[in-house]
Image (cartoon, rainbow, N blue to C red):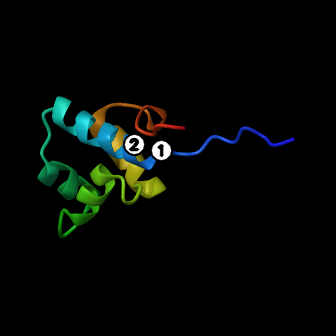
Amino acid sequence: MLCDTPTINMAATGANIRTLIKTRGLTISDVQNRCGFRTPQAIFKWMRGDTLPSIDNLVILANLLNVTIDSIIILN
């Protein structure tokens, strides 16, 4: 019998990150600066669902967006 193991929906999580940033009135530069990135490429990859933020960056993002990590990640 197979377990119903939850998996992260990367595309939906990326769209959620994009929406949260926009609805909080933040810019990509705001997130970039807070995460300490020299370029915004990682953030664009998150928003496209190509990659996920590291745990450290999820903590920073949740704090910046004033949400929990669970409300950022979308599961299948």
Secondary structure beneath label 1: loop
Dots 1 and 2: beta carbons under 8 Å?
yes
Question: Residue 16 location in percent, x, y?
Answer: 33, 37
Secondary structure beneath label 2: helix
Left or right relative to 39: residue 48: right
Circle 1: residue type: Asn
The Cα atoms of the two marked residues, 1 and 2, are separated by 6 Å
Left or right relative to 22: residue 49: right
- Mark 2 is surrounded, within 10 Å at the Cα level, by few (under 14), some (14 to 19) or many (20 or more) other residues, namely many
Quadrant location of residue 41? bottom left
Q: Is residue 24 visible?
A: no
Q: Which residue is mark 1?
A: 9
Circle 2: residue type: Thr
Q: Which is more toward the observer, 2 or 64?
A: 2
Up-down: is 53 above or below 15?
below
Quadrant location of residue 43? bottom left
The residue at 21%/50% (across/down) is: 31
Q: Is residue 64 visible?
A: yes
Question: Residue 17 location in percent, x, y?
Answer: 31, 41
Q: Residue furthest toward the bottom? A: 38
Q: Which is more toward the observer, 61 or 15?
A: 15
**Quarter in which the N terminus is drawn:** top right
Q: Which residue is mark 2?
A: 13
**Quarter in which the C terminus is drawn:** top right
Q: Which is more toward the observer, 18 or 54?
A: 18
Q: Please give the label number shown on residue 28.
A: none
The residue at 12%/33% (across/down) is: 25
Up-down: is 23 above or below 29?
above
Question: Residue 71 location in percent, x, y?
Answer: 43, 31
Q: Residue furthest toward the front? A: 1
Quadrant location of residue 66? top left
